[in-house]
Image (cartoon, grey):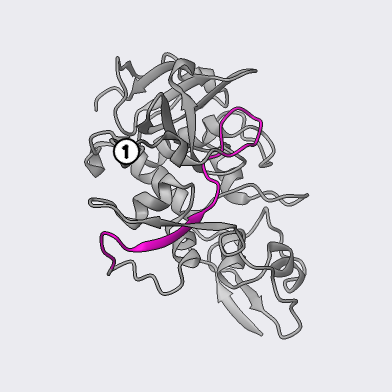
Amino acid sequence: MATYTLKAGDTLYSLARNNGISLNQLLEINPGLDPNNYRVGQIINVSASNTTQSAPSSASSTSTKTYTIKAGETLYRIATIHGLSLNQLLEMTPGLDPNNYHVGQTINIPSSTYQESTGAGEYVDPSAYESASEPTILRVAPDSGGSKAPWFDIAKRELERGVREIPGRVHNPRIVGYHQATTLRATTDEVAWCSSFVNWCMKQAGIKGTRNAMANSWLNWGRKLNSPRQGCVVVVKTSSSHHVAFYHSTARNRILLLGGNQGDQVKISRYSKSSVRAYRWPNGY
């Protein structure tokens, strides 16, 4: 039986995934382990000889097609465009070296990508937005320059973590942690958490957010921007309410937002420009 000592920033979900087992399997080999109450320094079991082999990861079992790397592109950017983490992209193309790739090289990407943010749960192929004169679909905003938008750097790291809701009765403690940045302080990952995610990222960067779990609480926060810049807070109108996230880039008549509770996870999704109600930037930056 192999053991592991929990470190700062670890989640049971990511630990289970890194060890090739499901969260339920991790809990099974750790009787008494509370997924909502564990601590740094706690020792847990991470494998057992009688553990059932886990199913393939979502990335490796996804239907794929090939993509040709273009000049100026990075694997991280390609992964982001197609709604993947860098690790998932590497899983899809065995042998792909993230430190040694070239223009013209073909890699595997999902056959269908970009969950539309309409609530319908459908996916749109990015090639539908490409044309011969525009070989890439993105017009990337000027780089935030790292420390110029530290909250956005933090959001991108959460994207790389692959944070998502856990189906069933178990709740992802990482998402529950986001909620603690609001006065609601919800204890499940089933409560809408887009505003909690934005508040948490701001808090981690030492910036005062709204501390409100409602997305529309950001409509008058900070200062108004007449046009988006990478990392700015964006409030959009949805069919039933509002949603808040961070501006990432633009794809034709749509904007790409990095946010939480987008398809039950931290990811980049498309929204219509016409749905935007506010672009906001923190005071003092």
Q: Which residues are magenta?
A: 101-123
| Secondary structure state at the residue bearing disc 1 | loop
Q: Quadrant of the N terminus?
A: bottom right
Q: Assess whether residue 117 is covered by the magenta stretch.
A: yes
**What count of labels does the image hold?**
1
**Residue 53: % across, % down:** 71, 76
Q: Nearer the viewer, residue 197 or 40?
A: 197
Amino acid residing under circle 1? Ala
Residue plotted at (61% across, 44% down): 176
The answer to if 154 sits in the magenta stretch is: no
Image point 34% across, 71% down: which residue? 97
In the image, residue 230 sits, relative to residue 224, either above or below, namely: below
Q: Quadrant of residue 55?
A: bottom right
**Within the image, what quadrant is residue 220 found in?**
top left
Residue 193 image point, x, y percent: 59, 34
Return the residue at label 1.
Answer: 132
The answer to which of 117 and 166 lies nearer the viewer is 117
